[in-house]
Image: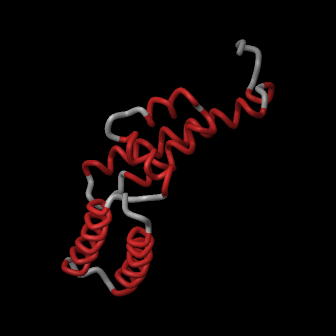
Amino acid sequence: MTDTQDDSTLPRRSRLGVLWTTAGILVLALGIIGIFLPVLPTTPFVIVAAFCFSKGSPRLRRWLVTHRIFGPMILDWEATGAIPRGVKYMACTMMAGSLLICWLIGLPAKVLIPQAVLMGLGAAYVLTRPDC
């Protein structure tokens, strides 16, 4: 692109690719943060990043699916929609622990009830996925 061109002259596909790639990078960053923060799940963000990269950057998708840590979880999910049993139990334990901490610090019911409902739905979804 020359200095005189603006975004409106880029092909639509190219602009969408940039948006998908940017979204993938942001979502992957959240997933990486989730490695260190137990209340933020890593796996769903990595899977969504792989999807975004498939729309915007085949090179980044290839890097992600061949990554020694992230690759297997993406490929397992794409092949079977499966979640390893240990990961299921860890996810549910972390959700329950987060809810318990929120209750112990005295958050009001108007916060705890929606949190419990949403975490319950999340746990139900995770537990109903096949094991790998």
At x 57%, y 30%, the residue is 58
Where, quadrant-wise, is the N terminus in this rendering?
Answer: top right
At x 37%, y 41%, the residue is 70
Residue lying at the far top of the rendered structure: 2
Query: Image check: 86 left or right of 26?
Result: left
As displayed, is residue 79 above or below residue 54? below
Quarter residue 126 falls in: bottom left
Residue lying at the far left of the rendered structure: 104
Residue 122, percent across and down? 42, 71
Residue 118, percent across and down? 43, 76
Residue 131, percent across and down? 37, 62
Quarter residue 85 falls in: bottom left
Q: How many marks?
A: 0
Instruction: Please state which of residues 83 and 36 is positioned toward the viewer in this rendering.
Output: 83
At x 27%, y 67%, the residue is 89
Colouring of the image? secondary structure
Where, quadrant-wise, is the C terminus in this rendering?
Answer: bottom left
At x 44%, y 46%, the residue is 74
Instruction: Please state which of residues 9 and 44 is positioned toward the viewer in this rendering.
Output: 44
Residue 80, percent across and down? 49, 56
As displayed, is residue 117 above or below residue 42? below
As displayed, is residue 102 above or below residue 44? below
As displayed, is residue 61 above or below residue 32? above
Quarter residue 3 falls in: top right
